Amino acid sequence: MRALIPEPKPGDLIEIFRPFYRHWAIYVGDGYVVHLAPPSEIAGAGVASVMSALADKAIVKKELLYDVAGRDKYQVNNKHDDKYPPLPPSKIVQRAEERVGQEVLYKLTSENCEHFVNELRYGVSRSDQVRDAITAVSIAGVGLAVASLIGVMVSRNKRQKQ
């Protein structure tokens, strides 16, 4: 079985482990999820779906969790319940169902699938993937700057000794 316990309940956030990123959906019951999918997002597409992140529009879809996950593992991950009070499950499902079929803006950094489901569950649009990626890039940039500075200093030191 692909699902990691616990089994989803209406209003739960579903984290789908795609290669290189996480796709997010909201469970609405009877095996269905609502999710934000760029037009090129193919259920279970894996690496090919990474290209969907370059789209600037998305469609809100209601599909079977089994089909959306494809061969990828998934889990319930209501990771912000300790920071934000979730809306009542019936309200989350209602809000999700009302959006089905809508075409919306899609921006990897500010309006992606994780922003979408967090807005539905908590009323707060946020994406930890984006925050974590920006942090990693910042740390890597600082590391490169420090390494460059050390290289310049060592080079100058060698020239002065000659």
Image: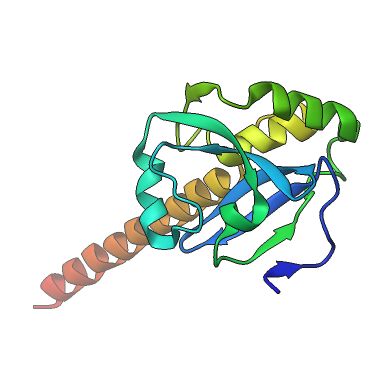
Judged left or right of residue 158, residue 30 is right
Note whether 146 is above or below 59 in the view shown: below
Quick check: 104 above or below 80?
above
Say whether residue 152 is left or right of residue 36. left
The image quarter containing residue 154 is bottom left
- The residue shown at (25%, 67%) is 151
Q: Position of residue 22 (x, y in %)?
A: 56, 54
Is residue 142 placed above or below 128 in the rendered structure?
A: below
Q: Is residue 60 left or right of residue 28?
A: left
Q: Quadrant of the N terminus?
A: bottom right
Q: Closer to the camera, 30 or 85?
A: 30
- Image coords of residue 157 (percent x, y): 21, 71
Which residue: 62% across, 47% down? 24
Q: Is residue 15 left or right of residue 79?
A: left
- Give residue 33's position: percent from left, percent from top: 69, 43
| Residue 60 percent location from the top left of the image | 57, 31
Colour scheme in use: rainbow
**Mark count:** 0
Residue 141 visible in the snapshot: no
Q: Quadrant of the C terminus?
A: bottom left
Seen from the viewer's position, the closer of residues 49 and 122 is 49
Q: Nearer the viewer, residue 155 or 82?
A: 82
- Classify residue 77 by image quadrant: bottom right
Q: Residue visible at 79% across and 49% down?
A: 78
Residue found at the far left of this picture: 162
- 116 over 147 or under it: above or below: above
Residue 64 visible? The answer is: yes
